[in-house]
Image (cartoon, rainbow, N blue to C red):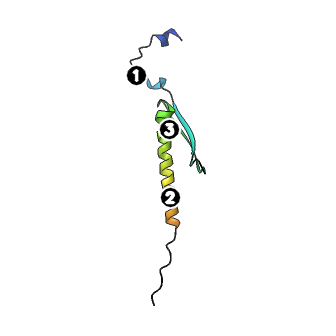
């Protein structure tokens, strides 16, 4: 450990350029993958605390969009004719 880093005041917040990047890569749904997503957040901290929630939100949005799209493609059953 260098003297500069050993002497740094740990109570001050890190400068933006010294913060870690957050990375998270995954696919969904787990049983039948349709999406591969990589989330990269510059200077955002840890991947589990910053990037993973973004991944989870994207998966929720994409699966909801797919469900709505599938529902829209379903044609209603023909109505019985009168008479």
- Mark 3 burial class by Cα count in 10 Å: few <14, some 14-19, many 20+: many
Name the residue that disc number 1 marks: 13
Q: Which mark is residue 67?
A: 2
- Up the image or down, 77 lies above or below 18; here it is below
Q: Which mark is residue 34?
A: none
Marks 2 & 1, CB-CB < 8 Å contact:
no
Q: CA distance from mark 2 to mark 1?
A: 43 Å
The answer to which of marks 1 and 3 sits earlier in the sequence is 1
Q: Secondary structure at mark 2?
A: helix
Q: Residue at x 60, y 49 (%)?
A: 31
Q: CA distance from mark 1 to mark 3?
A: 23 Å
Find the residue positioned furthest to the bottom. Answer: 83
Is 17 or 58 nearer to us in this picture?
Answer: 58
Query: Which picture quadrant has residue 25?
Result: top right
**Residue 54 in picture, x, y percent from top left:** 47, 41
Closer to the camera: disc 2 or disc 1?
2
Q: Residue at x 54, y 34 (%)?
A: 23
Closer to the camera: disc 1 or disc 3?
3
Find the residue positioned furthest to the left. Answer: 11
């Amino acid at each position: 450990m260098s003297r500069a880093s050993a002497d740094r005041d740990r109570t001050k917040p890190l400068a933006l350029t010294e913060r870690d990047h957050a990375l998270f890569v995954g696919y969904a749904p787990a049983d039948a993958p349709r999406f591969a997503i990589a989330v990269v957040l510059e200077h955002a901290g840890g991947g589990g605390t910053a990037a993973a929630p973004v991944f989870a939100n994207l998966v929720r949005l994409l699966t909801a969009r797919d469900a709505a799209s599938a529902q829209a493609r379903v044609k209603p059953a023909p109505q019985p004719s009168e008479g």
